[in-house]
Image (tube, grey):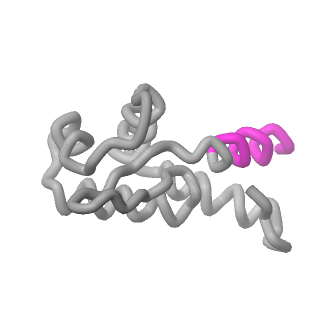
Amino acid sequence: MATSGVDPGLRLARLARALGHPARVAIIHFLRNQAGAVPCGEIVSQLPLAQSTVSQHLRVLVEAGFVIREAAPPLVRYRIDPRGLAELKRLAGEL
């Protein structure tokens, strides 16, 4: 994932902030163990949180580049974006 001119320190801080909530880390762990994209309801079933709360956490992860949102009417499915995780590892490794 290209940083498109964004300072690497700023990008790393944004990625770290996206992982700054335990529910988002749990979502990442869950999605990493899935064979493909899964609907929000399946993610909700793994967490002690309301669907609306999980949706908010997913939005943060999508915006950060950790998760890909796929429209598959009538559902929306989510899967890991390995480029986001790779970028986090690369930037953290440069510290």
- 90 vs 43, left or right, is right
- Residue sitting farthest toward the front: 73
Q: Is residue 28 above or below residue 77?
A: above
Magenta residues, as a range?
85-95
Q: Quadrant of the C terminus?
A: top right
Q: Whole-percent x and y of residue 54?
A: 26, 54
- Please tell me whether residue 92 belongs to the stretch shown in magenta: yes
Q: Is residue 42 above or below residue 13?
A: above
- 48 vs 62, left or right, is left
Q: Nearer the viewer, residue 43 or 9?
A: 43
Q: Is residue 20 above or below residue 74?
A: above
- Residue sitting farthest toward the bottom: 5
Q: Nearer the viewer, residue 12 or 40?
A: 40
- Please tell me whether residue 31 belongs to the stretch shown in magenta: no
Splitting the image into 4 quarters, where does residue 17 fall? bottom right
Q: Whole-percent x and y of residue 27?
A: 37, 41
Splitting the image into 4 quarters, where does residue 85 fall? top right
Identified at 24% across, 57% down, the residue is 75
- 67 vs 8, left or right, is left
Q: Whole-percent x and y of residue 38?
A: 32, 42
Q: Main secondary structure of the magenta part?
A: helix
Q: How many dots with numbers? A: 0
